[in-house]
Amino acid sequence: MNRLIYLNLFFIFSLFSYAEELEYKLGKGLQVGTLPLFIGGYISVNYENSSDTLKIDDIAVLAYGSYDRLSYMLELETEDIDINFNGEEEKKEEQLHIERIFFTYEFDENYALRVGKYNSQIGFWNLMPINVLRDTTSSPMVTELLFPKFTNGLDVKYSSENRLPYSVHLMLQENEDIDRWINDDVYNNFDIDRHYGINVLVDNSMLSYMFNAGYFRTVDQENKYYFLGAFQYLDSSFKLLGELGMQFNDDGVTLPYIAYLQYSKQLAKDHEAIVRVESYSNKETDIDDTFAILGYTYRPLAPIALKAEYQWHSLHKEDKLLFSISILF
Amino acid sequence: MRIFLILIGVIMGLIAEDFVVIANKNSPITTIGKSELKSIYLKKRRFWNETKLVALNLPPNNTLRQNFEKDILEMNPSQLETYWMKQHYSGHRPPYRLKSMKSVLLFVKKVKGAIGYIPYSLASKDVKIIYRSTH
């Protein structure tokens, strides 16, 4: 039901914008009148051959705006729906989730404070996690296993715009997931009630790099600590991206290493090829895997992505083919 | 006919006027570098000390805007579209767009943190020139 409501909302505001000759462009959202309120959203449908399922992965609505030094963001998402290819829909409770909700206050050019639930400022991939914006349908394992994707609490930011622009983020969480406000679920990759982390990002136009260190505690009282280094090199026709991390708990190392290196190349206008190599060792599950991904993305319009990828794993049973279509509104 | 069109293109290029970047008389900015301008127009930098900056754009098909984006942002329209799409997810909007250079001039005169680009010939004493393009 929620999905239908969302789809109708997208449809209505798209039509409304054209009817009123307001300026709406796909992928840029729509301003509500002259209010400091912009509405947008995104949807993604994925197919995976190993499970022969079609997954409605994301249906989300964004609402955001700013007034003077204060800005806000609300992102609501419905739970994933899996549909077997024989047409049977796996029954899942259709719940709304709070993916992000935060207020940001910018004091001056150096200091900003964010309060709420936000994408943890860790690595480059985690900052652009939705399918339509990321390079491949799948996300690197590092974003699933190493750190909490979302932080619920405070983010204190210091940034400097000197010759070498850099920023420092302090992430502070001492409470449970904000998603519990509206349901009993936790909408994060780890069920945590504490997270303290630091991020240092040097943003040097073409080459950016960052370092992260942090600690989080799961609700069942397990302490985990992580380190991550990441870099991104942007050229007009290609992009190089890499992240390398490790994690341990009070008993020892849990992830001695987890890493990926990705090269993406613009083949022609709207066409991109991606090669990614990933490797990790997980001592908790006793799984070691190294795999290569070859991906291809076609964007008939920038906010619409048609993607295909194949994964070759050292654990052969994990080999898979993925397709997806995703749209940003 | 083709040679004639090429010649016209070359002549138009030669007489393309330099642009200047202007700020309000009370703006804390005195001069600005290309990388700082880029940072402001990509909304990475939103303050100058304690003054909130308001970057102004002309319509997308305006030649001056195209020159500005090529010279300062060093990004083509497709790269910019992708960039602003990502910013939409992050909750940031592109620079405020005005219909004409005259509107840019008037806006900058009135708003302390406003920054805009106009042809050098339009610059007046009521605004401060903080950057001048050199072709």
Image (cartoon, coloured by chain):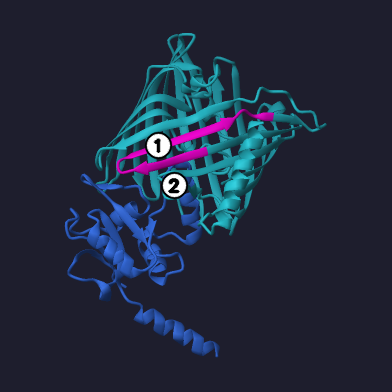
Chain colours: A cyan, B blue
Q: Left or right: A268 with respect to A242?
A: right
Q: Measuring 42% from the left and 40% from the top, which residue is drawn there?
A: A231
User: Comparing marks 1 and 2, which lies closer to the viewer?
Assistant: 1
Q: Measuring 79% from the left and 28% from the top, which residue is drawn there?
A: A88
Callout 2 secondary element? strand
Q: Disc 1 marks which amino acid?
A: Tyr
Which x, y percent locates residue A40? 52, 44
Q: Measuring 44% from the left and 31% from the top, which residue is drawn there?
A: A101
Q: Can residue B66 be found in the magenta stretch?
A: no
Q: Which residues are magenta?
A: A62-81
Give the chain letter at badge 2: A
Label 1: how many residues lie within 10 Å, few (<14), some (14-19) or many (20+)? many
Q: Can residue A79 be found in the magenta stretch?
A: yes
Q: Earlier in the sequence, mark 1 or mark 2?
A: 1
Provide the major secondary structure of the magenta segment.
strand
Callout 1 secondary element? strand
Which x, y percent locates residue A114? 35, 31
Which x, y percent locates residue B85? 49, 49
Residue at image mark 1: A72
Q: Measuring 29% from the left and 45% from the top, which residue is drawn there?
A: A165
Quadrant assignment for the N terminus of chain A: top right
Give the chain letter at badge 1: A
Tell me the number on the disc at residue A233: 2
Q: Disc 2 marks which amino acid?
A: Tyr
